[in-house]
Image (tube, rainbow, N blue to C red):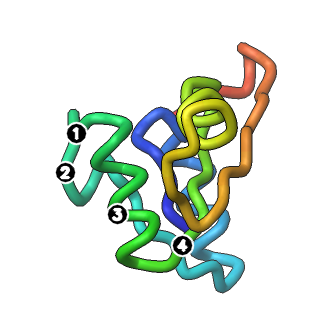
Amino acid sequence: MLADENVPASLVRVLRDRGGDILYVAELEPGITDEKVLNLSVTERRPILSEDRDFGELVFRLKHKAAGVVLLRLPAGDRSQ
C-alpha cells in the first residue's frame, strides 16, 4: 500500500504494527504532486490509500494509471497524529 501524505501518521503506524507493508508519501517525498503519487503507485505496484478524492478524478475520469485507489473517510475527530 502507498499511503498519501494526507493519511494520518497514527493510521500508518497501526497498519505497519499489524504487518502492513506501507510506503508513506510523507516520509518519502512530502509535497509531491498527485501525478507523482500515481506514478509511484505504478512503479511500486502499490494501491494508493488517500483521503484525496482527486485521485478518483485522475484515475477514473482522466484515465491516469494507478495500481488502485482506496478512498479513506475518517470522522474529523479521529485525526490524531
* Sooner in the amino-acid sequence: mark 2 or mark 3: 2
Which of the pair 16/66 is nearer the observer? Answer: 66
Location of residue 42 in the rendering, given as x and y in whole percent from the top left corner: 44, 69
Q: Amino acid at mark 3?
A: Leu
Q: Nearer the viewer, mark 2 or mark 1?
A: 1
| Residue 15, numbered label | none
- Please name the residue that numbered disc 3 is placed on: 40
* Sooner in the amino-acid sequence: mark 3 or mark 4: 3
- Please name the residue that numbered disc 1 is placed on: 32
Q: CA distance from mark 2 to mark 1?
A: 6 Å
* Sooner in the amino-acid sequence: mark 4 or mark 2: 2
Location of residue 17 in the rendering, given as x and y in whole percent from the top left corner: 62, 76
- Please name the residue that numbered disc 2 is placed on: 29
Location of residue 6 in the rendering, given as x and y in whole percent from the top left corner: 48, 33
Q: Amino acid at mark 1?
A: Ile
Which of the pair 48/75 is nearer the observer? Answer: 48
Where on the picture, by quarter, is residue 18?
bottom right
* Sooner in the amino-acid sequence: mark 1 or mark 4: 1
Q: CA distance from mark 2 to mark 3?
A: 11 Å
Q: Are marks 1 and 3 in contact (CB under 8 Å)?
A: yes
Q: Amino acid at mark 2?
A: Glu
Q: As displayed, is residue 58 above or below residue 16?
A: above
